[in-house]
Amino acid sequence: MTDSSADRARAAARNCEAAGLASEADILYRLAETLDLPFRTATLDDAGAVNAALAGADVLLNAAGPFSLTAGPLIEACLSLGIHYLDISAECAAIEAASRFHKEALRRRIMIMPAVGFDVVPSDCLAAHVAARQRGARRLAIGISGLQLMSRGSGRTIIEDFARPVMIRRHGRLEPVAPGTLEHLFDYGSGPRASVAVEWGDVSSAYYTTGIPDISVYFEATLPVRATLQAKRVWGPLWGSPLGKLWWQAHLPMIPAGPSSRERAEHAAVLVAEAEDAHGEKATSRLCTPEAYTMTAMTAPAVAERVLAGDLEIGFQTPAKVYGADFVLTFPGVTREDLH
C-alpha cells in the first residue's frame, strides 16, 4: 500500500467509525495497529455479533474472500442496519448474487457495489469507454496482462473456484466453457498476444454497466496461465472436492500473505477492451495501470470516500455506471489510449 492509499484507508475507516471486521483477530490487530485504528471482530456464522460489530458504521468495505462465502451474510447485515456495502471481489458468482439484492437495497436506500478493487474498476471503466465509442455494440472482449502476483486470499478464492467451469456471457446469459478452450488475440503494447478465457468479474459487472449481451474476459496466455487452466480442466473435480479443498487449505500457509511493496512496484498491468457491433465495426482501447494489488489499495478506499461524501446511487451498482468511464484516470500511474 502506498502512503497516499494508506492515508485514504485511515480517513475512510475513521469517517466510517468502523476500522474493520474479521474472523482472525491477530491479523486484524496487526493491521489496525499499523493504521492506528480501533477494530472489532466477529464470525459470519454469528449474525448478532456481525450486527454488533457493524453498529454505527456508514459503509462496509469487505476485503475478506472468497466473496462467494462472505458477501451474502455481510450484505444481509448491511441491509438490516442501513449500511452501504462495498467489496473487492473478482468473482462472477458473487457479483451476480449481489445483484439479486437490488430491490431490497432500493427499499433500504443503500448502495451495494461489489468489485471496487482492481477487478473491476479499471476494466469496468474501460468497458464503459469502448461501449461509448462503439454505439450499439453487441460483443465485448476484455484482455488482461500482468497479473503475476498472488496473495493467500486470492489462493483461497482459486480453491473455491477450481471445480467450476469458465463462465462467459452469451445473449445476456451466463454460459460455461471448458477451461483453456476459448482464445482471443490482444495487443498489450508489443503486438498481438494469445489470450485465454477465464472467469472474471467483468462477465457480470460489464453487463450491468454497458448492457452488451456477449462478454468474455481473457488473461494473456503465459505458461503459468495455460498450466493453471489445464490443471483446472483435468483435476478440477478432484481439487474442488471437499477433500481436495482440505488439502489445498492445509498448504495455503506456504503462499505469502501478499506481495511485498517491492514486488508490487516492479509490476504493472495492461488491459485491452474491444467493443464490436453487429456489422463488425469495432472500437478498441488500452489501459495501463499500476500492479493489481496496488491498484486495489487506491480504488477501494477512493470509492469508500465518495460514498461517505454522499456520492452514490442506491441499489445494486457497478463502478463505471455510477462514477463514469474516466473515474479510473483519476488515479496516479493510469493511462488510456484508443487503438482503433
Image: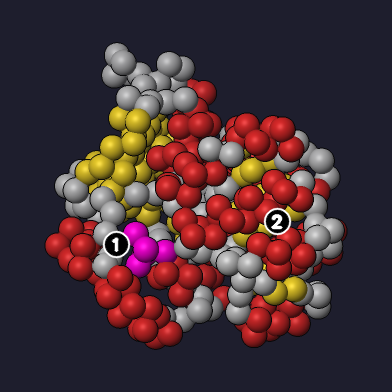
Residue type, numbered disc 1? Phe
Name the residue at 45% across, 32% down. 207
Q: Please tell me whether mark 1 sits on a helix, a strand or a loop.
A: loop
Q: Please tell me whether mark 2 sits on a helix, a strand or a loop.
A: strand
Asked if residue 149 is among those painted magenta in the image, a careful observer would answer no
**Residue in front for this viewpoint, 60 or 148:** 60
Give the colouring mode of the picture. secondary structure
- Mark 2 neighbour class, 10 Å CA radius: few under 14, some 14 to 19, many 20 or more: many
Name the residue at 31% across, 50% down. 198
The label on residue 60 is 2
Please state, as top left, top right, bottom left or bottom right, where the N terminus lies in the image.
bottom right
**Residue in front for this viewpoint, 191 or 165:** 165
Residue 29 locus on image (x, y percent): 70, 82
Give the mark nearest the N terminus, 1 or 2.
2
Q: Is residue 123 left or right of residue 328?
A: left
Residue 202 locus on image (x, y percent): 44, 42
Q: Which residues are magenta?
A: 157-161
Asked if residue 159 is among those painted magenta in the image, a careful observer would answer yes
Taken as a whole, is the magenta stretch helix, strand or loop? helix
Name the residue at 35% across, 67% down. 159
**Residue in front for this viewpoint, 230 or 49:** 49
Q: Which quarter of the figure has residue 327?
A: top right
Q: Is residue 138 left or right of residue 58?
A: left
The answer to whether one can see residue 335 in this image is: no
Q: What residue is disc 1 on?
A: 162
The answer to whether one can see residue 63 in this image is: yes
Residue type, numbered disc 2? Leu
Q: Is residue 315 left or right of residue 293?
A: right
**Residue in front for this viewpoint, 100 or 37:** 100
